[in-house]
Amino acid sequence: MAHRGLLIVFEGLDRSGKSTQVKLLADALNLKNLKSEIWRYPNRDTSIGGLINDYLGKKIELEDHAVHLLFSANRWETVSEMKRKLNSGINLIVDRYAYSGVAYTSAKEGFELEWCKQCDTGLPKPDLVFFMDTKIDELEKRQHFGEERYENIEFQKKVYSNFKKLFNFENLEDCLVLNARDTIDNLHQIIFKKTFEMIKNENFLTNKFSFLW
Ligand code: T5A
Ligand code: NA
């Protein structure tokens, strides 16, 4: 029976190097004929994604609960295509997912983690999450930091502590924490090795998914 593809997610604060590693990983897998696609959330190409894009770019204002649900809807609107691709054996390398949804909204005043998790319940659960762990004050030095909504140090600190709660950094079954201050190439080597091991593990790739949470 054909293997399904892996669902691999990258998470981390703004500018922590996710997109850089997502691209390197997808390219390296494709070079080995392990068919892989890059996905990202928010997916700014849909009409919901267009609203989110305007919100992040500070062109429009949206109520905080409403925007949280839009981010979630932006995942749900692509979920059948996600399952179809995974079932056809394509690995999906995903730049942010529901963990960002929860970590960012629950950094806002008056939002409980549990409420934030609710709307993403039932989404496919990633096989592997890479968390790009950065020193918050170093993000400011990276290119373009500060242009979009949420890109300020105080907010990012709250987001970071929410990620810690979500992933339970002391008991890392769901997630591999990477030192995002390492060089781009070193990080890629670690990420590729871990992913390749998983792809080669026959026992691991059943055709079933788990679901969040
Ligand atoms: N959001 C998202 C929610 O609130 N709810 C949700 O449900 C979701 C899904 C959009 C925003 O939306 C929020 C979270 C975000 O605030 P985005 O479009 O993913 O998120 O924006 P960013 O996370 O900011 O994505 P970026 O592309 O801007 O950052 P990346 O991908 O983390 O970083 P990258 O790879 O582009 O690198 C940034 C810079 O650092 C350099 C790169 O060359 C680049 O200049 N760099 C390194 N420098 C030194 N050492 C390294 N190891 C480096 N790696 C990269
Ligand atoms: Na950004």
Image (cartoon, grey):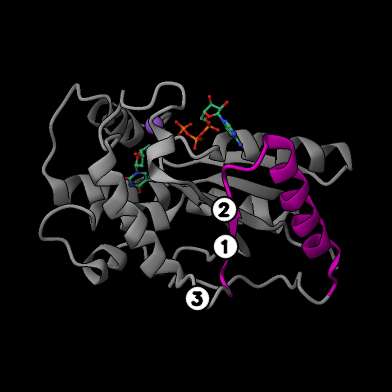
For label 1, count other residues whose C-alpha is less than 10 Å away and answer few (under 14), some (14-19) or many (20+).
many
The mark nearer the N terminus, 1 or 3, is: 1
Find the distance from the CA under tag 1 to the CA under tag 2: 6 Å
Residue that mark 2 sits on? 9
In the rendered image, which quarter is residue 148 located in?
top left
Find the distance from the CA under tag 2 to the CA under tag 3: 19 Å
Q: Residue 197: x percent and y percent?
A: 82, 62
Residue that mark 3 sits on? 170
For the residue marked with disc 2, what is the amino acid?
A: Val
Front: mark 1 or 3: 3
Q: Residue 135: x percent and y percent?
A: 44, 46
| Residue in the image at 62% along x and 62% along y | 128
| Residue in the image at 74% along x and 52% along y | 190
Residue that mark 1 sits on? 126
Q: Quadrant of the C terminus?
A: bottom left
Q: Quadrant of the N terminus?
A: bottom right
Find numbered disc 1 in the image and state the secondary structure of the residue it sits on. Answer: loop
**Mark 1 vs ligand 1: CB under 8 Å?**
no
For label 3, count other residues whose C-alpha is less than 10 Å away and answer few (under 14), some (14-19) or many (20+).
few
Answer left or right for 98 relative to 21.
left
The answer to whether residue 194 is above or below residue 186 is below
Residue 191 magenta-highlighted: yes
The answer to whether residue 166 is above or below residue 145 is below
Find numbered disc 2 in the image and state the secondary structure of the residue it sits on. Answer: strand
For the residue marked with disc 1, what is the amino acid?
A: Pro
Q: Which residues are magenta?
A: 173-202
**Tags 1 and 2 touching, CB below 8 Å:** yes
Residue 207 magenta-highlighted: no
Find numbered disc 3 in the image and state the secondary structure of the residue it sits on. Answer: loop
Residue 34 can be seen in this image: yes
